Image (cartoon, helix red, strand yellow):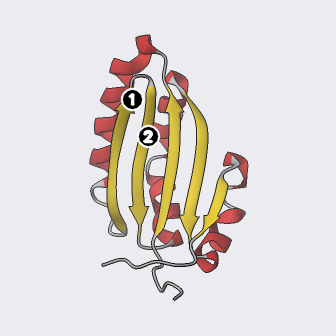
Amino acid sequence: MATQDRCVTIHPYFAVPEPNLAAFRDLCEQFVSATRKEAKCLYYGFSFNGGEVHCREGYEDADGVLTHLENVRTLLGEALKLGEVKRLEIHGIEEELAKLRQPLNDLSPSYFVLEYGIRR
């Protein structure tokens, strides 16, 4: 059974040196505050494993992703002064991923095509 789920998820993994972790955590609060007002955001948060930081985020569709990236552009620039993106994955159905390939080209993400599943 194929999926009708249009949700797009982003999976960035940051490497943040220990001396920068406190400042990065402060930025995380700002990211969450800025993202809270986005209508198409399904969930958003940060997980930590020492200096490895994962931003767990999901959006209704590709337009939600693009709106989010525009909304946090300045904050992301600040975060990249404190750490670096080690891996970036984008997951969703091909129709939605196709809308992101050109706008996200400079970020060099890995795309994963969702083919089977459910979402409640």
Quick check: 82 above or below 116?
above
Q: Which mark is residue 106?
A: none
Residue appearing at x 36%, y 32% in the figure: 48
Residue appearing at x 50%, y 55% in the figure: 10
Residue appearing at x 27%, y 55% in the figure: 36
Residue 15: percent from the left, percent from the top? 52, 27
Q: Quadrant of the C terminus?
A: bottom left
| Residue nearer the viewer, 112 or 72 | 112
Q: Residue furthest front?
A: 1
Is any atom of residue 31 visible in this view?
no
Q: How many marks?
A: 2
Is any atom of residue 63 visible in this view?
yes
Residue 110: percent from the left, percent from the top? 67, 54
Label 2, secondary structure: give it: strand
| Residue nearer the viewer, 56 or 83 | 56
Left or right: where does residue 38 sit relative to residue 61? left
Left or right: where does residue 47 sit relative to residue 4? left
Read off the residue under disc 1. 49
Dot 2, crowdedness within 10 Å: few (<14), some or many (≥20)? many
Residue 6: percent from the left, percent from the top? 48, 78
| Residue nearer the viewer, 81 or 17 | 17
Q: Tell me the mark number nearer the camera, choosing from 1 and 2.
A: 1
Residue 56: percent from the left, percent from the top? 40, 50
Label 1, secondary structure: give it: strand
Report, in whole angstroms, how far the alpha carbon at label 1 lies from the one at label 2. 8 Å
Q: CB under 8 Å between callouts 1 and 2?
A: yes
Q: Which mark is residue 54?
A: 2
Q: Of label 1 and label 2, which has the lower sequence position? A: 1
